[in-house]
Image (cartoon, grey):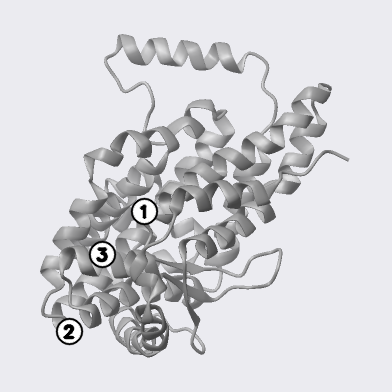
Amino acid sequence: MTPDVPWALAVRVAGQIAGTHPLFESYHRTALAEEMPGIVARAQDLVVAETGLFGTGMPRVEVVDRRAWVERNVAFFSAIIDPAREALVASSPKAALQRVAGPIVAAETGALLGVLAKRVLGQYELVLPADGAGDTIYIVGPNVLALERAHQFIPAEFRMWLALHECAHRLQFVGVPWLRDHFLDLVQRLVGSARPEPGRLRRVTDDLVKAAGAGEPLIGEAGLLGLFANEDQRSLLDEMQAMMSLLEGHGHVVMDRVGSRVLATQGRMSKLLKQRRNDPRMAAFFRLTGMEMKMRQYEAGEKFVLGVESYAGWSTLDAAWAGPENLPTLAEIDDPVGWARRVA
C-alpha cells in the first residue's frame, strides 16, 4: 500500500494563503445566504428560456467562505487523483519517492487553490464519485462582497449576473444527459495516463531549447502540466480544453445576453470582470500553473459561439449537445464555420 496524499495539508496551506474578508464576518454573510437561492431560481428560468436546456428541480445553493471552497475542490481532486497516484507511485521502486510524493502534491495543490480561492466568485459542482454530493452552486461570499464594494456594483444586479453564469453551467451538465460522464471520463483518463517516462527530463529540456531558439514562450498556456505531459496526455488536454472552451464560451454569452436585457449595469460589470481576468499581475502565475488555458477558454469559446451563431444561427449550437462526437475539436474552436459545416 502506498502512502496517501495528505489532503488535509493542502487545505491548511490553501487556507493560510486565501485568508478571508471582513465583510463576510458581518451580517452581510447571512443576508447573502438568504438572498442567493431566490436569485438562482429566477436566473435558472431565464437561462432555460435562452438556451432551451432543461434541468429537473433546483440546485442547492450554498454561500461559503474561501476555505470551504478549497475543501470541496480538494474532495474532487482526491477522488480523481488518489487511484491514479496509487498506480504511479507503486510503479516506482524508490521508497524515498513514495514518502515525499504525497506531501509535495498536497502542498502544491494547496498553494494553487489558495491563490484561486481569493478570486473565484462561484462554482457549479457536479456529483462527485467519492461522496455523492453535488448539483450545488457555491457562491464564495468573501469574494462577491469584496468585489461589490471595490467596484461599487449594485448587489442585486451583480448577484443575478453571477447566478446567470452558474445556472448556464448547471443546465449544460444537467440538461445534456451524457456530458457529466464524458467530462469525468476525460479527467480520469488524463490523470490515469500519468506514468513514469524514461528520459522525460531530457525531452522537456530539448523542448525548452527548441522553444527558446524559435522565440516562443518557454511554458505554453497549458503550464507545467502541458510541458511535462506525454503525447497521450497532450491529446487529452486538447480535447479537454476544446470542451471547456465551448462550455465557458456558451455560458459567458448566455450570461451577457440575458444580462443585457434584465440588468441595467451589465455592460459595466462585464467590462470590469474581463479586465480582472486579464490582470497582468496574475499573468505569470496563470501561465506557470496552466490556468492561462482557462483564461483563453473564455475568449476563444465566446468567439466560437458567436461565430457559429453568425454563420448558421443560434440553434445550430444545439448540435454540440447531440453527443461527444459533435463537440468541437481544439482546431475547430478557432474555426466555427468548419465545425458548423461538419455537424450540420
Task: Compare residues 291 and 245 and report the one nearer the observer.
Answer: 291
Can residue 337 be seen by looking at this rendering?
A: no
In which quadrant of the rendered image does the N terminus lie? top right
- Residue 254, position in %: x, y? 27, 72
Looking at the picture, does residue 204 appear above or below residue 260? above
> Which of the two marks, 2 or 1, is nearer to us in this view?
2
Q: Nearer the viewer, residue 185 or 118?
A: 118
Residue 47 placed where, x, y %? 32, 81
Q: Is residue 94 left or right of residue 237?
A: right
The mark found on residue 258 in the picture is none
Q: Secondary structure at mark 2?
A: helix
Evaluate if marks 2 and 3 touch, with contact meaning CB atoms under 8 Å apart: no
Q: Earlier in the sequence, mark 2 or mark 3?
A: 3
Give the percent coordinates (x, y) of residue 221: 36, 35
Residue at 46%, 47% in the rendered image: 17
Q: Which residue is mark 3?
A: 147
Identify the mark nearer the N-term, 1 or 3. 3
Which amino acid, by three-letter code, is at mark 2? Val
User: Mark 2, residues whose alpha carbon is within 10 Å: few (<14), some, or many (≥20)?
Assistant: some
The numbered mark at residue 262 is: 2
In space, the residues marked 1 and 3 are separated at their CA atoms by 25 Å
In this rendering, the answer to whether 82 lies above or below 224 is below
Residue type at numbered disc 1:
Ser
Q: Which residue appears farthest toward the right when viewing the image?
A: 1
